[in-house]
Image (cartoon, coloured by chain):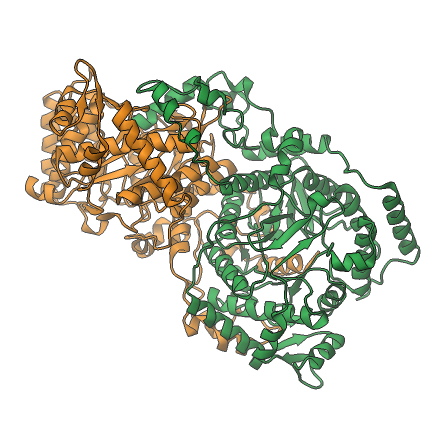
Chain colours: A green, B orange
């Protein structure tokens, strides 16, 4: 046993029997202390130099190839109204078909007016988020059809779990925005689901939120509800974007009707539109990462250019979601080496145009095990190196997006908080260099009880939510809990102590009245 | 359910029922295909720009503070012979005490002759490793007192497990060297343990290995056995370093007798010595990361300077092991945000002097769960950003170094291989940009069956050992296995197919004769 082993062992002995004095589940990241520590995770930035995975020439090669795709192959634009707008701006629409081609000059002219940075406003000004630049914004898992927790297992999305997941999102300041419906509550009829869901987003959280682009009426309802939630005029709402939408292209090279309608409604009112091609290399995109990036870039540039055709200067974002599939089964893979490279190169492309960059915290694990953790941390590693600004699915995403997990949410909150601490600059002041403390202790002593330590130990280090550092004896006595078990306990304690954020009663009344009226009107048609 | 969800779901459907055609456990990283794919993981490099966490001024502040520590406070040098050598080179030895102080000029003069890069030779030339520069060398877990696997649980180290872990190390080319005894075989008497263990290191693997510095005789035996293993003369052995030792300082500011003796024996014969202070912030080092780095740097510079006093130009390495402890219990913590910063700043310090940089893949988890994975990937993230050259404990380390885990070894091999793939440059050739494939498929098609895909799908993406990407239905049918379960299966199949690397019978005979002779002589005294 080497000195490394011996010393580790010694320290472990010193720790024996101390387990009882350990912080309760939740720790610094937990509900109890969130109120004091949470705010430190607002307005996060990543000021580290971003990784240049590809040379400037290689980025230009992808850029030029993607413009060639739009010029020579074009995209299928599956909405007549959108084709008309594109035609009016000089795009080449093939008569009697959905195919539209775009000269490179047109694309570059259009995207030139996209803001490099913008603020997404919330009903609580503390929760406003800045998009683009060095800003780092984490959004909760979105759009999972299933939900799971350790006790209840995997089940179809429903309103109760939907609301619980919103409460979890509200409980941690590291979660800066919700990202849509964390799970799809299919027990609410589709015609009125958006009304109940958005009402919950406004009441159960005070963070910025997302509107699905699934038909014009849903977008206009969402915009009106966001306006009511903030208690402002439509004019102010247009000056202060308060609602975002994620637009997925139907890769390869298609934008469908509802998505195009969403761009029209949201951009027209100056609300942020994030274009995210779903380019899985080997399935909906070429099997090479570079080829998938060419297609991702073409589809993103087309959608972003369209936002500017609708309204010059409307806020927009560049979404990167390129990953690979398991070529043996076709199953999507996430958090892979290929995913990491695509995320970092995607960041270079977004910065080339000056777009805010949207990425994700992904994994394809079926449970909250080592795989879920390493695929997530690999994802986040590339997100930070790649300069991601807006990180969708930051917490709770499992199974390639099919399931929202209570425990994965807690685990991810811990991972995100550790990354925030990692990005915090290191103190190298004279006091931190600690020459006097080293002199006081001298060879062979130890620092547990020194004044330098006692003055700092409370907040010297990040206290994780999940990590169990007890020695083996104490851990076995405690029933050998895994990180999954610990996360389950924390999720319950956080939900038990959830408090609704304050809301102006007049605003709540107006919101309820709007929902009631729209329900009387039958909500929206669901036959598209 | 958004388009992202819908598309993911679609792909999952396509994957249903394909589970049967999935690769068997082991995959690309497994034993069966290692022989063909393994060599691609030899001679790894990390050519990415390294992260400059601290400014040049901040690095100089740590550098200067550490030289002040050596000049004003000094170190306790717990071996008269070592104090004599230091005194002869101009160090200030306090009469009648172990305290030695070093003028900054003496330290800087001594370390100037440390080679920036050197080769560590093995009995199989394919396995030689290059230390320093952009080279990336992964060593197996070392020095754990306990061993565990899923079936057998946690137990005291023994020869059977020791040998099994060596066989696992031999089975993956991503493991470039062993790192010592993966687990301490306490069922072999301490007086002869090093003879049996080194004999196994030479016979069961053909990779470079480590000798513990636990007394002069053990070092001289190890050097002689390494010479015999390579079948070379002592002169050639001195020209071609073939055995390394890790020297841990007894922090704070002490080097004990056996460690100093190890430096004397190893450096005198030009074998690599890696100095690794064990500076846990808040315990054996200041509670501030910057202060712990000052102490780490002082202790490392002292040990490395001593290697040059013993023999000018002898190969040496700078070890960074600074982490924090849980201030509530004193338990050591690894893979934390503080650990990550210390690893990256440590790399800046090592590069400031041009030393090869030794780091580690750490975690403090009690089982192979999400915590074990995220603490490890956070560690490896900082190792790559920090430019680590020689990564000790790369595979199999759990519980802060107390336990070597079969399953964690397999999991880590997968993580290391994913990092190697991540570091592989992205192909941005015209063929990779895939304009023709995108043109052929066009809007709305898919790429599964295209010529571009068929020509590449076999090796397009890394096939993980552990990751289970089956859809939920297939995964549940398979018994809902976790990554821990999968790793257990793989470990067994790899051990079942282990083959001893070829060895010259004459060499084996000479080695056995030496071991027999030394055992007759009683091995080494164990009373120190």
Q: Position of residue A130 (x, y in %)?
A: 64, 52
Quadrant assignment, res B158: top left
Q: Residue B129 or A462: which is nearer the viewer?
A: A462
Rendering quarter of residue B82: top left
Image height of B191 relative to B499, above or below: above
Which residue does the image show at 76% across and 49% down from the upper left? A185
- Left or right? Give the position of A257 relative to B167: right
Residue A63: percent from left, percent from top? 51, 71
Judging depth in this view, the residue of A302 and B431 nearest the camera is: A302
User: Would residue A481 be seen by someone viewing this image from the given angle?
Assistant: yes
* Location of residue B401 with respect to B232 vertically, above or below: above
Quadrant of the rendering where the N terminus of chain B is positioned: bottom right
Q: Is residue B392 visible?
A: no
* Circle count: 0
Res B356 → quadrant: top left
Q: In which quadrant will I find the C terminus of chain B?
A: top left
Instruction: Point out the residue furthest to the top here.
Output: B96
Residue B403, given in percent of the width and then of the height, sits at 39, 29
């Amino acid at each position: 046993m080497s000195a490394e082993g011996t010393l580790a062992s010694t320290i472990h002995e010193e720790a024996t029997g101390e387990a009882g004095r350990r912080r309760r589940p939740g720790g610094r990241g937990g509900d109890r202390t969130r109120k004091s520590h949470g705010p430190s995770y607002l307005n996060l930035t990543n000021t580290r130099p971003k990784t240049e995975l590809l040379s400037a020439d290689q980025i230009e090669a992808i850029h030029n190839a993607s413009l060639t795709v739009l010029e020579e192959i074009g995209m299928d634009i599956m909405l007549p109204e959108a084709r008309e707008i594109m035609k009016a701006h000089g795009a080449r629409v093939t008569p009697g078909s959905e195919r539209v081609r775009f000269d490179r000059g047109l694309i570059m002219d259009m995207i030139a007016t996209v803001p490099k940075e913008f603020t997404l406003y919330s009903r609580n000004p503390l929760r406003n988020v800045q998009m683009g630049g060095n800003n780092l914004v984490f959004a909760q898992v979105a759009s999972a059809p299933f939900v799971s927790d350790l006790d209840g297992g995997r089940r179809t999305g429903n309103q109760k779990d939907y609301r619980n997941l919103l409460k979890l999102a509200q409980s941690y300041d590291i979660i800066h925005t919700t990202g849509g419906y964390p799970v799809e509550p299919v027990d609410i009829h589709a015609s009125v689901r958006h009304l109940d869901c958005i009402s919950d987003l406004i009441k159960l959280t005070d963070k910025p939120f997302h509107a699905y682009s699934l038909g014009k009426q849903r977008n206009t309802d969402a915009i009106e509800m966001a306006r009511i939630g903030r208690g402002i005029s439509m004019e102010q709402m247009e000056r202060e974007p308060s609602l975002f939408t994620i637009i997925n292209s139907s890769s390869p090279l298609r934008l469908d009707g509802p998505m195009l309608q969403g761009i029209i409604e949201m951009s027209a009112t100056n609300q942020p539109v994030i274009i995210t091609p779903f380019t899985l290399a080997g399935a909906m995109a070429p099997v090479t990462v570079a080829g998938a990036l060419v297609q991702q870039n073409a589809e993103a540039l087309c959608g972003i250019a369209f936002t500017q055709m609708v309204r010059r200067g409307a806020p927009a974002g560049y979404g990167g979601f390129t990953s690979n599939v398991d070529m043996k089964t076709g199953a999507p893979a996430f958090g892979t080496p290929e995913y990491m490279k695509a995320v970092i190169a995607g960041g270079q492309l977004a910065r080339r145009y000056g777009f805010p960059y949207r990425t994700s915290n992904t994994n394809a694990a079926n449970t909250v095990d080592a795989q879920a953790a390493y695929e997530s941390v690999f994802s986040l590693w590339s997100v930070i190196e790649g300069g991601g600004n807006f990180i969708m699915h930051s917490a709770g995403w499992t199974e390639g997006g099919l399931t929202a997990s209570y425990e994965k949410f807690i685990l991810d909150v811990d991972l995100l908080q550790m990354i925030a601490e990692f990005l915090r600059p290191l103190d190298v002041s004279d006091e931190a260099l600690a020459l006097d403390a080293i002199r006081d202790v001298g060879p062979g002593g130890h620092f547990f009880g020194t004044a330098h330590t006692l003055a700092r130990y409370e907040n010297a280090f990040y206290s994780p939510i999940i990590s169990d550092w007890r020695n083996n004896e104490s851990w076995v006595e405690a029933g050998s809990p895994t990180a999954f078990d610990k996360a389950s306990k924390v999720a319950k304690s956080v939900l038990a102590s959830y408090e609704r954020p304050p809301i102006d009663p007049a605003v709540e009344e107006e919101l309820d009245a709007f929902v009631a009226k729209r329900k009387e009107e039958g909500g929206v048609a669901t036959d598209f």
